[in-house]
Each structure stands twice: as structure tokens, then as C-alpha cells.
Image: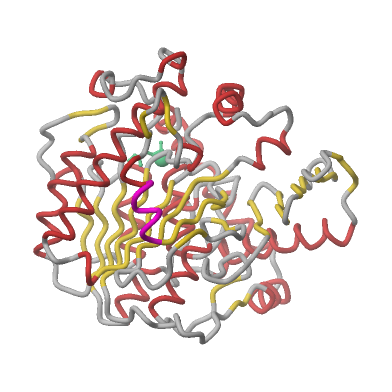
Amino acid sequence: MIASTTNILMYHYLDLKRYIKNMAYLYNANDINEAKQTLQYYNENDWLYGKYKGKNLILLQLESFQGFVIGKTINGVEITPNLNRLAKEYYEVPNLYIQTTIGGTSDAEFIVNNGLLSTPDIPVYYTDNKFKNSLPRIFKELGYKSYVMHANNESFWNRGIVYRNMGVDKFFNKQDYEIDEQILLGLSDESFLRQSIEYIKQLPKPFYNMMITMSTHYPFRDPKFSNELDVGKFEGTLIGDYLKSIHYLDRQIGLFINKLEEEGILQDTVIIMYGDHHGIPYNFRQELASFINVSIEDDYDWYNQFKVWGLVMLPDKAVKGRADGIYGQADIFATVFHLFGINRPTTEVSQSIFKNKDYVYLPQGIYKNGNKIYLTYTNKYKDFDNNEIRNIDTNIIEKINKIIKYNNILVKVINK
Ligand code: GP9
Ligand code: MN
């Protein structure tokens, strides 16, 4: 859905770009200073801090992957047997809220690599941001080489230009892969991951490597998935197709991790995998509701389920189990700082997943705190303990607006 409208959107982005440039002047020096200071967050210097200094990092970004499939069976068959197994061995982050907006996959890349929220009016990859504070640049300072692997054209989502600005040493793109099997948008994940292993083996160590899968893209229906899973009554529905595609992705991840282990790379690598954005579109929310058996009647219900899933694989398995706090995709950035001992501030919207935290901000003016969802555009919140909807205190609205305003300042003005 997102990709099919991409060309049309690009046209508007170029116009928007000029507008955004002018917007920068709306922020005064005070705002900018305050934004920097207010959002500053430092990791604690605890036992985990810097424990993986010098290890490789793989960020494995999974197309449309949402966590409601984890641990579930359909007609007695596990949907994600490999991820279920890995979730037991490593550290699972079930409440990882989605902070992407108009820029889809590219927003997720931006958020994780820069520790900031996306901006709903423009995909960050089409702003003048020069991504000075991004992970590839930071890892470069630590003596790493940095890579991105994704089997699409360099120009898609403006990636070629953005990655150069981010300081990525090489972008392994469509031209670097033999397109020997096609699923939906392009090269199948099976082939992508198999060919990527060969490249990974050759990389100088230590490396930073972001890998982006593609096969589980909307609308999730492809002949290669038809025999994946017996989805019973969901056959022929969007969610049925989604489950089949996810079952396929799960198998590819299992093979990829096994291969990394066989090659002796896993033991020296921290892997963080996470979904890029939601898979089930808003228009199909009733299919999601019936599958997860939770009612989705209004925006509060929708945003309460608006989450992907994350897994942090520490090579020595020093932390296992489930993070029971509430996190957002931007928290992955601070988590990397924490694990690799990067002694710089991140932001209020980027705190380590290994810290207990029970709130998250979404760029649309949404705040989740404990069991409550606050929507600034209705001025109301819903308390899921009793399903009551009430007015938000003005001081909370001000706080949410301030965080988001400051985030946008850092995205559009500072981070150049
Ligand atoms: C394309 C892929 C999909 O390369 O990352 O982008 P999306 O449509 O999901 O934003
Ligand atoms: Mn995507």
C-alpha cells in the first residue's frame, strides 16, 4: 500500500521540502537550546553498560512485522516457531510502539539510527537532515565500518543519498544481489538472507550492519506463500495472507541465525530485530481485532495495539526474558548506546530498553502511559483499566506537545 503510492508521494515531497526549509526559521534560538537540554538523556553506567564494546552489531529490520503472532498457533501449528524459540533464549520486547508515520520503512530506519521520532508531515529521508548523530557515523568514530543491506534500488526512499549522509560505508543494494527469486516487491527474503551471509562473511570486523527484509510487504499475497500455513477460516482474508507471509519470514530468520552460528559470527554479534511498522492496515482493524480477540472500536483501542515487536540477542545471553515496560522504536538507539558503551546523550524519546519505563510518545501527538492512551487531538484519554474516557489535564497536554515540538526541532533544525 505504501510502496504503490510512493511515486505520487515523492512528487509532493519535493514541494514539501521547500516548505519545510522555511519552517526551520519558525524556531528561535531559545527553543532550540531548550529542545537540546530538555530532551537530553544519558544511559546509566550499570553492569550492562559497554559490555559489548567491540562486538559486531546487526540491526535486522523486519517488514510489517507485528508481535501479535508470537507464541500463537493456528490449527495447532505455531505461526512463528523460530522466533518463539529465540524469544525464550534471548530478550524479547513485546511492547515496542510504532513511531513511524508517512515515511513507512524509511521512517523506521531513521528512528532507530537517530533516536528521534518521525515527523508526520514529511518523511525524514526527504528533509535536509544530514544525520550527523546517526549510528553509522558514531560507529565509525569507534573504528567500525558500517553497512546496509537491502535488495531494492538505491533511489527507493532516497536511501542512496541518505545513507551517504549517515556515513554508511557501503549500501549493498539491488545491484549487489542476483535476483533469482521474486516475492512481491522484489528479491525474496530467502535469497536475500542467503546471499547476505556470503557478504557478511567477507566484512572486516567489527562491523555495523543494518539489514532490511522485504517479502512480508502489504498486501502479503504471493503464490510462494500459498502452501505456508493452513489458516483455516482466515483463508482468503488479509490477515490469513499476513500469517502465511510471516510464517515464511520466521523460517528465513531461523535459517539466517543458524547460519550465523555455523559461521562463528553469532558469538561476536549483537543482533537487534524489530518490525518496521504495522502490517494490518487501519481499514482491516476488525480482522486484527477478531484474531487477537480484543475489541478495536476507536482510536484509543487502535493505538493501544499499535506496536511491533523486538528481540535483543546478546551473544552471551546475559539478559533473557521479556521487557515488561513500554517502549518505542526510538529506544533501540539508546539501547545500542547502552550495550556498546557510547558515552553521549540520547533524547527523552530514546531510552534504553534495559531500563524500566512505562510510557512512550508517538509523533501524531499520542502518549501511552501505563494502561492509558492519551490523544492530544481529542484532548481525551482512555483508561484501559475501566474503559473510561476522560479529559486530559492541560499540563499533560502541554508536556506531550512540548516533547513532540522539541523532537521536530531536533529533526528539522538541529540534526544537520
Ligand atoms: C522498499 C521497502 C518497503 O524498499 O522498504 O517500504 P514501505 O512501502 O514498507 O515503506
Ligand atoms: Mn515497510
Residue 405: % across, % down: 69, 60
- Looking at the image, which is closer to me, 90 or 107? 90
Q: Would you place residue 214 above or below residue 399 in this image?
A: above
Q: Quadrant of residue 282?
A: top right
Query: Closest to the observer: 410 or 369?
Result: 369
User: Is residue 86 rendered magenta in the image?
Assistant: yes
Quarter of the rendering containing residue 146: bottom left
Left or right: residue 324 compared with residue 193: right
| Image location (x, y in percent) of residue 134 | 41, 68
- Nearer the observer, 183 or 155: 183
Q: Main secondary structure of the magenta part?
A: helix
Is 412 placed left or right of 230 in the picture?
Answer: right
**Where on the image, by quarter, is ligand 2?**
top left
Quadrant showing the N terminus: top left
Residue reaching furthest to the front = 76
**Looking at the image, how many numbered discs can be counted on the residues?**
0
Does the magenta run of residues contain 336? no
Write the start and end of the magenta stretch as one range. 84-90
Give 202 or 363, whichever is nearer the viewer.
Answer: 202
| Residue 24 position (above or below residue 138) | above
Q: Residue at x 21, y 74 (%)?
A: 206
Q: What's the residue at 13%, 35% (across, down)?
A: 179
In the image, residue 53 above or below residue 246: below
Colour convention: secondary structure
Q: Position of residue 66 (x, y in %)?
A: 47, 41
The spot of residue 406 in percent (x, y) is 67, 65
Q: Is residue 364 above or below residue 283?
A: below
Q: Which residue is rendered at x = 69% and y = 66% of the image?
A: 27
Left or right: where 298 falls relative to 87? right
- Residue under the image location 37 percent in, 76 percent down: 138
